[in-house]
Image: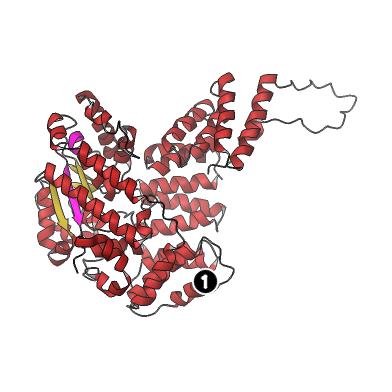
Amino acid sequence: MSNRLPPAWAKHLKTQPPAKAAPPKAAPPKAKPQARPPRAQADDMLLRQALELQKLDQLPEAEELCHRVLARTREHPLALYILGTLGLDFDDELSIKYLARAVTQEPNNPYYRLTLGETYLKVGDYLPAIRHLQRACELKPDLLEALCGLAQAYAKFDKADMALPIYEKALRIDHYHPQARMGLADTLVSLGRMDEAAACLTENIARRLNVPGAYNTLVGIRKFSTEPPELKSILDELANPAISADEPYGLHLAAGKVLNDLGRYGEAMDHFLKAKTFRTLDFDIESYRRWVDSLIGLFDAGLLASKAGYGNPSEAPVFVLGMPRSGTTLTEQICSSHPYVHGAGELTKLGRIAASIGLKGEPGQTFGWTVKSMTIQQSHALAEEYLSNLRLYSPTAPRIIDKLPHNFELIGLIAILFPNARFIHCKRDAIDNCLSCFFSDLKKGLDYSYDLGTLGLAYREYERLMRHWHSILPGRIFENRYEELISDQEGQSRRLIDHLGLTWDDACLRFFDKAGSVRTISRWQVRQPVYKSSVKRWKNYENRIQPLIDALGDLAVL
């Protein structure tokens, strides 16, 4: 996306038109086209150079040229657009500001709308993403990227039923468009329409459309008791000498999943280990440890006492949190089966607020200053910013769940902004939890899961931070152990609903019948009744996971 060059460039970067044949003598003479002003020509030249530098990945140099254009031509839309694309993956919030300014200058440019909408989608701000992507589709109805982005935004915004016709429209334009076909299959899975999803994925594989992704999703919506033909096909793909560098990762994960189902654990582990060799471990455990130290040092009992009465007293926010693959999706599904609870999924808003006040990134001497100096009015504004975003998912539900697992890092901030919020901490056997992370394709930013030893060390930091939160917020955090939920579903479910301050409803026992979409990698599992096969699963791999056991230390209960 960062190198997309919209056709709008042709409008801004004009070249001399080719010479035309002389008109007939009878025709009236045509006026000569006006030459572009010297400043506009200079801007064009600089922006051409900026584009070339961007293609060469010389981003600071490209940025400097764009700023030179803006210094003499304020709000130049194309300079703003390029600056917006340069910031993607480095500072998405700043990119949004530049792209929004470009859209303000040229509101009818579908490519500016597309990139702004995609960036909002990337950061998890789905309503503005929908607005800009919808407008891009109106301006250019055959813009497939905008159609796919709009469908994805609706699906992420818990409106998967609205995503389906948009994907279908895209496929009427290009029946074999990879992004549209994979998006359609994912949406069908989210809605629980597994047979239709499987048919779509099988056709994708036959047409050679995102083969690793298609296989990974296909094997994830079934549990295998006998060897399926897909396993041989996956292994044949891996043995193909023409396989591209980006394909083995997903194929190895798919093979590992099937082999795990079949109880062929040694072969499964071979594939899971091989898969992770195709990912780069970009996680600094020492830096993360320093950050956890800083959070513990900042959010102490004294700070919370000094901020009593701050924030918003709403009881609507419910935070289901813990390590990924600890049972957060199952917990949300059980709770949101209650008529007074809405599950909003994994929201990014809180993390964006935390970043805006300096709680993300490498801590320095000024870490936490914004929190310490926060006024009651500022706390009201931050709480309202989060709450207004939460209410987009359900304007009237008495309880709304945000189940982003890593919100466990921000419990101290939440306690200040929402003194009446409920916390549900999902906890699972440490080795099982880590192994499930290792077997999964977790989101970007969770790359500690690529290495067993690093995974164990990251888990220890999570455990250390949670002990701190329990110590300064006694009685506020409900401990929801996965193993207890599995062994005593009704009893633990009743305790969950009681923690939410609600009366019991039997619908919570049939969470797997709940209508609506599920938007996480657990989407097949949570449509099944509670099963016990994931408890102590690590025993099947005990002789292959010593680096994880060593890293966990006393947290590994053997």
- Of all residues, the one furthest to the bottom in this rendering is 226
- Residue 422 falls within the magenta-colored stretch: yes
Identify the coloring.
secondary structure
Q: Can residue 406 be seen in this view?
A: yes
Q: Residue at x 37, y 38 (%)?
A: 127
- The answer to whether residue 439 is above or below residue 501 is below
Image quarter where the C terminus lies is bottom left
Magenta segment boundaries in residue numbering:
415-428
- The answer to whether residue 314 is above or below residue 251 is above
- Of all residues, the one furthest to the right in this rendering is 25
Q: Residues within 10 Å of mark 1 (few under 14, many from 20)?
A: some
- Residue 95 falls within the magenta-colored stretch: no
Q: Where is residue 372 in the image (x, y as percent from the top left)?
A: 22, 29
Foreground residue, 238 or 399?
238
Foreground residue, 192 or 15?
15
- Report helix, strand or loop for mark 1: helix
Q: Tell me which amino acid carries mark 1.
A: Glu
Q: Which residue is drawn at 42% across and 43% down?
A: 122
515 relative to 482 in the view: left or right: right
34 relative to 423 in the view: left or right: right
Quarter residue 328 falls in: bottom left
Residue placed under numbered mark 1 in the picture: 237
Q: Where is residue 69 in the image (x, y as percent from the top left)?
A: 59, 24
- The answer to whether residue 327 is above or below residue 231 is above
Q: Residue at x 25, y 64 (%)?
A: 431
Foreground residue, 484 or 409?
409
Tally of marks? 1
Q: Where is residue 83 in the image (x, y as percent from the top left)?
A: 53, 33
